[in-house]
């Protein structure tokens, strides 16, 4: 079977692995491809995960079967295999999409059994006498003689929901795309022998292992399937899972079920092998001959329907675009026509093309009107050949341009006669571009407000300055409402303004003394609404040759001061009106 090896040089923005995979798919280089690279979903980020999901979706639609190694760090897919301790669970994002086959690893468990001949068969050159039992590949620090995190990658995706094909005995009911799908030998102690750089003095013989070797090995088996059937298979997972379901229902045995071992590594508890599917080896390894011979024998011609993205948000009057993928299974070749239900009022949908024969994609455009009601709509896409029907669910969220209003700080405390400042911020939603003006209500008496700037276009902030008047603005707590409006849309938010003040009292109100005598008064300052300022005391209206002394000379918050007024023999006898004043510089 001819094969191609594609190498691309990395650029400043794109890795060579991405470029090579993209080249193979865009140019339909082969019906089967293998990628022995990986990066966990978290590290890939949204753009990276979208790239690989879209690429493998395109590959499947073109009939290309994409196989990807599940990873060599066991359940700790975000850590390097050479690390001594894992930091948490994770899976290879290149391998976890629903559109590729994820290949995990097994390990021969020959023990003391004799499963091979000491000499090669003269005709086939084979030395193996029978099937060698397998366990989960785990040569990590958890295993005797192991090191690092070297083990079969596997676990649950945090990106993709469980695809329709992923069902059968052992498949977790976790709602997530689980990996791997299948597995092949990956242990270094049973490595794959290759020759590279053979010379007169060196055989150039190397042993390689890991799921990076298992994936291209399984790709070779899929190439045999394509060769036998004469048909490109695209995403072969529906058939692989159908074979597993059939086997565990008593049908043809294609898989060597791995029921022993796990992919736990130092620091991370992984997944244990079990009957049927598991997240350490998938369905297990395969009997290559059975896989090829019975590829279509136990699979009813059928198809699957999927859609991407799962949800879209658009403004009223805007079109939402989805990609609908139909994957033919078991030689299914009937034309499938698409329809959709659940559309909101004044919305319409168009499939291009309206039907597909064989695997492929159709572009779904959902057009909304300015009158389409705002809301979230669950939609059902159905593909049917008139006899068989399958559906996929998507969500359409219809929005309208809007904005949010926030204000800070949430509360301010000032003394009457001073200034309070707040910041009102506008943030656009769904492409909002309007002009917003501001207002405030709930101001206390004697207070005024100014917004700078008075309006904001689309997004930005305005400073609200509130001026109070000493002697007019009373102490108290005031709930203020800041509103923003463009004439159609209005939003509001609340802030609190706390105004403090104080009162001053002097007693007794009147005293009579003889010339050259003295009088003592008490000045009492009472803080209002949490007043904490410091007021200095003074008195005016003293008679000639009289002096006044405050002890203390100032009061902080609340308190009293003793005022002593001393006269002399030169002070004229008369009635004097005195004014005691307390001032903190604001009032």
Image (spheres, helix red, strand yellow):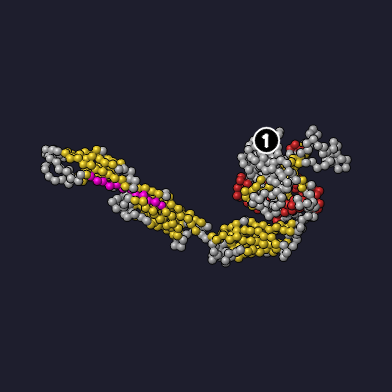
355 horizontally vs 13: left or right: right
Residue 104 visible, this orientation: no
Decide: is 390 above or below 34. Answer: below
Q: Nearer the viewer, residue 277 or 582?
A: 277
Give the residues in magenta.
495-506
Q: What residue sits 73% from the left and 39% below the top? A: 187
Q: Is residue 487 visible?
A: yes
Q: Nearer the viewer, residue 251 or 550?
A: 251
Please identify the dominant SS of the magenta region.
Answer: strand
**Residue closer to the observer: 310 or 65:** 310
Horizontally, residue 554 falls left or right of residue 324, namely left
User: Does the magenta run of residues contain 499?
Assistant: yes
> Mark 1 — residue?
141
Q: Residue at x 85, y 38 (%)?
A: 117
Number of callouts: 1
Examine the image and state in which quarter residue 190 appears: top right
Residue 197 pos. (x, y %): 77, 37
Query: Residue 420 in the image: x percent, y percent?
Result: 37, 50
Observer-nearest residue: 459 or 117?
117
Q: Is residue 259 magenta?
A: no
Q: Which element type, helix, strand or loop, lies under badge 1?
A: loop
Please tell me which residue is depicted at 32% across the width and 55% down the height of the picture: 445
Coordinates of residue 317 in the picture (x, y in percent) = 55, 63
Q: Residue 348 falls in which quadrant of the image? A: bottom right
């Amino acid at each position: 079977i001819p094969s191609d090896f594609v190498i691309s040089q990395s650029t400043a923005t794109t890795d060579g692995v991405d470029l090579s995979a993209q080249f193979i798919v865009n140019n339909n280089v082969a019906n089967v491809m293998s990628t022995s690279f990986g990066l966990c979903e978290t590290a890939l980020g949204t753009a990276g995960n979208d790239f690989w999901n879209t690429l493998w979706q395109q590959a499947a639609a073109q009939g290309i079967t994409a196989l990807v190694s599940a990873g060599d760090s066991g359940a700790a897919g975000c850590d390097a295999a050479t690390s001594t301790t894992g930091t948490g669970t994770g899976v290879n994002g290149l391998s976890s999409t629903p559109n590729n086959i994820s290949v995990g690893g097994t390990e021969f468990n020959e023990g003391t059994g004799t499963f091979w001949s000491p000499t090669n068969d003269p005709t086939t050159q084979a030395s193996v006498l029978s099937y060698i039992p397998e366990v989960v590949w785990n040569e990590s620090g958890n295993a005797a003689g192991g090191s690092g995190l070297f083990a079969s990658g596997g676990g649950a995706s945090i990106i993709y929901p469980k695809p329709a094909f992923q069902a059968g005995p052992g498949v977790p009911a976790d709602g997530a795309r689980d990996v791997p799908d299948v597995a092949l030998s990956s242990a270094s102690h049973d490595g794959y022998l290759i020759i590279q750089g053979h010379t007169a003095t060196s055989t150039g013989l190397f042993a390689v292992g890991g799921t990076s070797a298992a994936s291209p090995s399984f790709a070779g088996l899929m190439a045999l399937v394509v060769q036998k059937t004469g048909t490109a298979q695209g995403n072969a997972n529906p058939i692989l899972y159908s074979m597993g379901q059939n086997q565990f229902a008593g049908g043809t045995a294609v898989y060597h079920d791995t029921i022993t071992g796990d992919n736990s590594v130092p620091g991370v508890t992984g997944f244990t092998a079990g009957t049927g599917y598991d997240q350490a080896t998938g369905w297990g390894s395969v009997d290559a001959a059975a896989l090829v011979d019975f590829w279509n024998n136990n699979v009813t011609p059928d198809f699957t329907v999927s859609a991407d993205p799962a949800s879209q948000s658009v403004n009223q009057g805007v079109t939402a675009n989805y990609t609908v993928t139909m994957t033919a299974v078991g030689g299914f070749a009937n034309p499938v026509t698409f329809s959709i239900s659940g559309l909101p009022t004044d919305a319409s949908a168009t499939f291009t093309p309206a039907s597909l024969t064989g695997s492929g994609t159709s572009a779904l455009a959902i057009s909304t009107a300015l009158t389409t009601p705002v809301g979230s709509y669950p939609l059902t896409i159905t593909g049917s050949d008139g006899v068989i029907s399958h559906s996929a669910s998507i969500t359409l969220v219809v929005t309208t341009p809007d904005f949010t209003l926030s204000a800070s700080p949430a509360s301010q405390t000032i003394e009457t006669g001073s200034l309070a400042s707040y910041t009102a911020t506008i943030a656009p939603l769904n492409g909002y571009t309007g002009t917003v003006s501001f207002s405030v209500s709930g101001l206390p008496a004697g207070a005024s407000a100014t917004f700078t700037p008075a309006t904001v276009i689309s997004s930005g902030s305005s400073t609200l300055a509130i001026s109070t008047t000493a002697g007019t603005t009373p102490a108290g707590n005031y709930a203020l409402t800041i509103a923003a409006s463009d004439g159609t849309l209005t939003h509001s938010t609340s802030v609190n303004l706390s105004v403090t003040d104080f009162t001053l009292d002097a007693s007794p109100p009147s005293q009579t003394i003889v010339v050259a005598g003295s009088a003592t008064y008490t000045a009492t300052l009472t803080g209002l609404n949490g007043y904490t300022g410091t007021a200095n005391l003074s008195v005016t209206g003293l008679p000639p040759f009289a002096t006044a002394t405050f002890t203390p000379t100032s009061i902080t918050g609340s308190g009293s001061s003793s005022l002593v007024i001393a006269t002399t023999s030169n002070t004229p006898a008369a009635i004097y009106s005195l004014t005691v004043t307390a001032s903190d510089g604001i009032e």
